[in-house]
Image: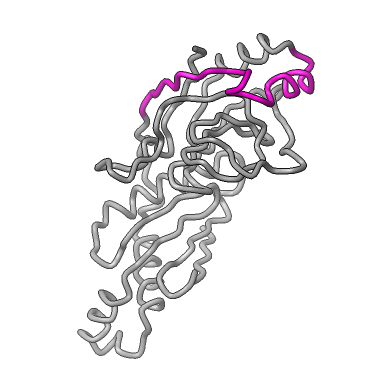
Amino acid sequence: MTVQLTPLGDRAVVVQLEQAAGADGWRQMADFAWALRQQAEGWIVDVVPAYETVTVLYDPSVLWQEIGKGSETQDLVPYELAERKLRGFIARGILDSDREIQSRQIDIPTYYGGRYGPDLLESAARSDLTADQFIEEHAKADYTVAMIGFMPGFPYLSGLPQQLEQPRKSVPRAVVPAGSVGIAGKQTGIYPLATPGGWQLIGYTPIVLFDKERSEPVLLRAGDRIRFIPM
């Protein structure tokens, strides 16, 4: 198994597995992130899975304390100790578990078209469909949250029917409203916050995907199964 570890600033390590490349690479990354969280070591602050990488954020002060405890670590800096620990986890086989990704079925009520989906008509035309046909095809597909990224709570959803694939807008919008449902390339997604963006907007959901006041601010997680329910 080929594993590459790369520093990201002075508080993070990016772990990349060559075998994780491809459309389903996110599954192995989500599984690896889950396994790392189970280690429950105080130096790990957060673990962020993506399509082909996992970023491990760590606390240098905790690692400094550990460096000072033993002669074999005194010549290391925190990143080197973090890398040694991660390679130790990998050598012990935590990447080889057959754990089934824990997923939830979550329905997303969605208002399609009109002021809620200003790009629906053009998107449907590019797909050689009527607006109603486009909505039907988008809503009947089964989606999976492949990763959370771009901004807090933004889900990248795999499972978009090929016919519905859309190019990004040539000129991004200055503001995309929170809750907007969009398509870019082979993916569909939902904007959790108002932000600039270049995805084709086809609908809107009132579901709040990110709320910093909640005990778990981010609603969705990698592996969740999503259905869009037309309103």
Give whichever of 52, 135 is nearer the camera: 135
Give whichever of 1, 174 is nearer the camera: 174
Which residue does the image show at 47% across and 45% down from the upper left? 28
- In percent of width and height, residue 53 lies at 51, 55
Q: Is 54 situated above or below 209?
A: below
Q: How many numbered markers are drawn?
A: 0
Could you say which quadrant of the image residue 93 lies in?
A: bottom left
- In percent of width and height, residue 187 lies at 61, 34
Which residue does the image show at 31% across and 61% down from the upper left? 45
Q: Is 186 situated above or below 5?
A: above
Q: In the shown orientation, is residue 83 left or right of residue 137?
A: left
Which residue does the image show at 36% across and 36% down from the upper left? 219
Determine if the magenta segment contains residue 81. no
- In percent of width and height, residue 226 lies at 46, 25
Could you say which quadrant of the image residue 159 lies in?
A: top right
Residue range of the region highlighted in magenta in the rendering: 104-129
Q: Is 221 situated above or below 144?
A: below
Determine if the magenta segment contains residue 125. yes
- In percent of width and height, residue 11 lies at 40, 71
Chosen colour scheme: one colour
Which residue does the image show at 74% across and 43% down from the upper left? 171
Give whichever of 115, 16 is nearer the camera: 115
Q: Is 200 situated above or below 26?
A: above
Q: In the shown orientation, is residue 3 left or right of residue 120?
A: left
Give whichever of 45, 16 is nearer the camera: 45
Could you say which quadrant of the image residue 131 lies in?
A: top right
Q: In the shown orientation, is residue 33 left or right of residue 63?
A: right
Farthest-out residue, left: 69
